[in-house]
Amino acid sequence: MANIGKTNRLVIVRASDQGYYLDGGKLGEILLPNRYVPEEVEQGDELEVFVYRDSEDRLVATTDKPFCELCQFAALEVLSVHQKIGAFLDWGLPKDLLLPFAEQGQRVKPGRKVVVYVMCDRRSNRIIATTKTNRFLNQTPPDYEPGQSVSLIVMERTPLGFNCVVNQAHRGLLYHSDLKESLKIGREMNGFVKKVRDSGQIDLSLSEDGFGRVLSLSDQILDALRENGGRIDIGDRSSPETIRRVFATSKKTYKKALGTLYRKRLIRIGDDRIELGDC
């Protein structure tokens, strides 16, 4: 059976004026339009094709390779924004990928790259994108080894550094203190695992020799304050979700670290912010 939003190997069952029809199993016959038909193929041959819905919502196949498939993370360029529907992204196919307003954490702008997860909308059964990626990242601590090479997509800038999608599955962090220059959101590159913490946070490096300094939570907080002009808008009453997203730790552990720094007179604590102390 063919899988929508995925690359499939399907058999040609018959020819037509429009192209070749492929055996989609329970999905029925799927048209491969003439412009995508390779030379010297015939009925009974098996082809590798991507299956999706065209602009008229019909199932079609293509031999073109999209930039990403269903259940994958990707950095895609915003082509346009429709005032009532959402944004349209370039994913390498004639029909652009929809990023609905409801799936945008922040409004996106044409010409910029955004990091999205490709999903199937349960209501319409159509392939769409979402920038609300947290729910699709694996929260289970991975078994990566220090020094292991991994693929990265730069997802967002935080006070500590840049959160990245690691190997299409996990969240990792490149610290500002380990970087020689700022990174662009959406950049795709290879990196290395420094350490997997007990919390599941993955510390990353862009060089194989970047494993000398592993920061405690207190050091992370101080480095983040220095990097952000002496203030971070995450304080004593900030939500557990915000604290976990930025520092990959629980609110209880975060407040304990703040208390330690406060007693050393290294920080000042407010309800919604922390600041470097006078000492």
Image (tube, rainbow, N blue to C red):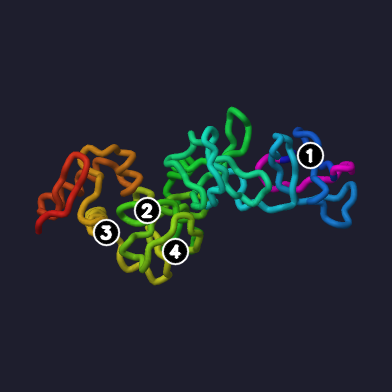
Residue picked out by circle 3: 227
| Mark-to-mark CA distance, 1 and 3 | 54 Å
On whether residue 229 falls in the magenta region, the answer is no
| Mark-to-mark CA distance, 4 and 3 | 23 Å
Crowdedness of circle 1 by 10 Å Cα count: few (<14), some, many (20+)? many
Mark 4 and mark 3 lie on one chain; the one further toward the N terminus is: 4
Residue at 21% in and 51% down: 231
Residue at 20% in and 49% down: 257
Crowdedness of circle 4 by 10 Å Cα count: few (<14), some, many (20+)? many
The label on residue 192 is 4
Q: Amino acid at mark 4?
A: Phe
Residue picked out by circle 2: 157
Q: Amino acid at mark 1?
A: Ile
Labelled pair 2, 1 in contact (Cβ < 8 Å)? no
Q: Position of residue 45 (x, y in %)?
A: 86, 50
Circle 1: element type: strand
Mark 1 and mark 3 lie on one chain; the one further toward the N terminus is: 1
Q: Split into 4 quadrants, where in the image is the C terminus? A: bottom left
Q: Relative to 56, does residue 141 appear above or below in the rendering?
A: below
Labelled pair 4, 1 in contact (Cβ < 8 Å)? no
Crowdedness of circle 2 by 10 Å Cα count: few (<14), some, many (20+)? some
Residue 216 appearing in the image:
no
Circle 3: element type: helix
